[in-house]
Amino acid sequence: MSSDDSVELDTLSDEGALWRLVTALTGTATPFEVAEVFTKDGPASVGGTFANMAILTRESNLVQVVHRPAFNPTVVTQRGTFDLNAETPACEAIRSGLPVLLASPAEIAARFPALLTEIEQAGLRSRASLPLRSATGESLGAVGFGWPDPQVFTAQRLRRLDLVAQLIGLALERATGHQFDPGQADRLPRVLETMPNAFFSLDADLTITYINAEGERLLRTSREDVLGSHFLDAFPEAAGSEFEHQYLRAIESGRSVVFEEYYAPLGGWFEVHAWPDRDGLNVYLSDVSERRNSEHQQAVALDEVRHAHARLTFLADIASRLHGAASRAELYDRLSEAVTAMVADWTTITVPAGEELVRVAASHRDPVLDGLAKRLVGGYPHAFDGPSPGVVVYLSGKPLRLAELAGHIVTDLDDSIASAAYGRTLQLLGDGPGLIMPIFSKGDVVAVLTMARTKGESFSDDDVEVLTQVTESVSELLEEALHLETQRETASALQAAALPRTLPSSDRLALAAGYRAASEGTQVGGDWYDAFELQSGRIALVVGDAAGHGLHAAALMTQMRNALRAHLFDSFGPSESIAKLSSFIATQEPEAFATIICVEIDPITGEGIWASAGHPAPILLRRNGASQHLRGKPAPPIGSADPQSPDRPMEHPFILNAGDRLVMFTDGLFERRGVDLEIGLTHLMITTEETRTIDDPEAACESILRGMLTGTHEDDVCLLIADLRWVP
Amino acid sequence: MTLEDAVAVDEPDDDIGLNPVHSTAEPFEICVQVTPGRCEMVLSGELDVFTAPLLRHRMAEMSDELGTELVLDIGAVTFIDSTGLSLLVSQHKKLKAHGAELVVRSPTRMALRLFAISGLDSVLTIRTAGDDA
């Protein structure tokens, strides 16, 4: 389609219609008969709905136009007689000797405004008129065509219009007696000889009665050899072929046939139109090998594209299922699930450990059998010196296909009870074709992927190729997962190192602390607590929360914890120490963000002060009286201050009486997605109240953590408790 | 601001490494309107460790058009975690360093409480819905 509102003439042009036109023209003897045939069969030959014919009377320069009126298309009627100078498409075509092409109503309106209404009333939106000429170039008239849609007149379409005009011109020339040669009057040979397409005629007995020049060329024969011969004598290879079958069918049924068939002796594909008339069968042939070949190539190419697309989709799907695995164990789990969901019925993954392969993941398509498959994880190892096909793949590094995976494995099992149980499990998972593939990392086989199909479909070369790509991508992901594991271990180690190994203890002040890593996700957070005795004998208590996760947050946390320790130890007090830390961080780690609360308590008197940078105030649980959040305004968090003028947090005094409990915490303890902040804080208050009867601060700490952290929590949590005791 | 004025609506996607764990949460959306010298971003959903990178990314993209005032409407933000707070603070500092201002508009009761608990109410420029009239 070269334009949205144009009609593809070529797809509408009916080759059969062209040849019906040719055949019908053979019987015409007068100009009127030619017009009768043309107005009937002409439109379809160019994919149109309308045709008229203008006949020029040279002596009078009058143009007689005949057509089939829309109200009665069965009869050819004289439309009128025009002066050659009249403003009509036909007259202009005759005058100019050139085609008049009107592709749309707009073009009709521009060139023949007087005719627009009439043309549109006839249901036409485009028109074309072409001059008719005799073989000697003498002007005979014009043919007109009409379409119900706008047209794009490409060169190819123009050739078709011109061909029809030539045919009509020849027929008209013959009918009017111009240049008429009675010697060739028989079956329109003159017209047929000029045709650029192969044509031959058979009589009812399939004897060849006519073949045109193009037919001789295309079929690599000569008329001397084939005229008068039986079709099958002339073309013996056609015996029993689709050609013979279709020709006979057309003759017997009296209906035209259209088909495409390969003719081996000529090594080409032919499009064939055959239509019977009273004398036998007319056959029009064109060589469509080029199209067929390109179609074939297109089909092959399309198939490859589809195939490649399916493969890419598969790989993308697998990649998305594997992406984001935080550890090798998780990656193996995901791989096993993905492969089972997409290419196998059940899957296991083993990794080398010591001198054997140990199963680390297993999945089955069936949810019930999946539970059974999962029981294989961790059990039934394959010794490297044993016959297991997984070991063979591990040692060779090459994929292995087995016709019956479970059967193959079971055959080689020893007769121990464990092996028997393993064998039974495999049989229950289902036997069938298996594929075992190595997974490499840095050149070594680090895992073996075993896949089974229980419905008999073997793993094809293509499957192996695609799954090889999968295992290659797994190799990269493994390295990434290992990197994450290492990072997490390092961060965990940093986190652990940042927390004090022991808490200071005295008869008067009993401390307890708890840390819980986030249960969701895998990143280590930046929460910490600290407690130590100052030179003054006071106890410093710190709880902090550095924003972010992972190694960076852990490192930042360590840095802040140490800096704060130094300032507090130098007796700067909570407020000044936080201010010093704040300006240090503002210059050293401008992207850092953290909240901190600092408390100092005199264990003898119970007098304390606290200061906070963006951190929630502690809860004070009074032995006599309700618990309360200590009141006081926090300074903004570390990292939000202007480095030039860091905020100095207010110091708030408080008194711990004997039996009172001070509870410090990070926001992970009470903040929940979808839970109102106030509700979270109230929940914490109630949970703290409930520890009133618990004397041991360790036990109280556990109780609060247990009470608050039900289900999963995505942030890490720190809790620090200080109890002031009676001293006897 | 009306949604008809919006010039861009972003939804979180995976290409900047979002963790799919929280796929059940309502989508985080940023609706941007730019007028000369002023930019408004209307946020909805949860502003947290997973979505804060989206906002940071969007702000970095828009940095030439932020003007002298960037208004962040957080009236439809249902949750803010410490990473979200940290982003608000870092953008506040960044804009201030360039002589511009970050205005946090229409905070919910929850957000106001969070700003109070964290002391950020004295740092951020907070404008409640009524202040605009």
Image: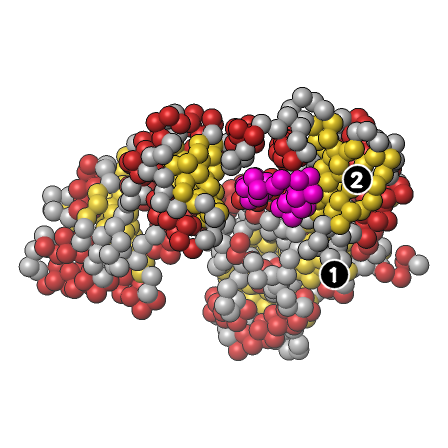
**Could you tell me residue A687's position as x and y percent?**
57, 73
The label on residue B76 is 1
Q: In the rendered image, which residue does mark 2 sit on? A: A64
Query: Which SS class for mark 1?
Result: strand
Q: Please, which chain is the residue tagged with disc 2 on?
A: A
- Classify residue A577 as left or right of residue A357: right
The front one of B95 and A71 is A71
Q: How many marks?
A: 2
Discs 2/1, front: 2
Query: Which amino acid is tagged 2?
Result: Gln
Give the overall secondary structure of the magenta segment.
helix
The front one of A613 and A315 is A315
The part of the chain drawn in magenta is A18-41
Residue visible at 63% across and 61% down? Answer: B26
Farthest top residue?
A136
Specify few, some or many for label 1: CA neighbours under 10 Å numbering under 14, 14-19, or 20 or more: some
Asked if residue A581 is positioned above or below residue A178 in the image, the reply reads: below
The label on residue A638 is none
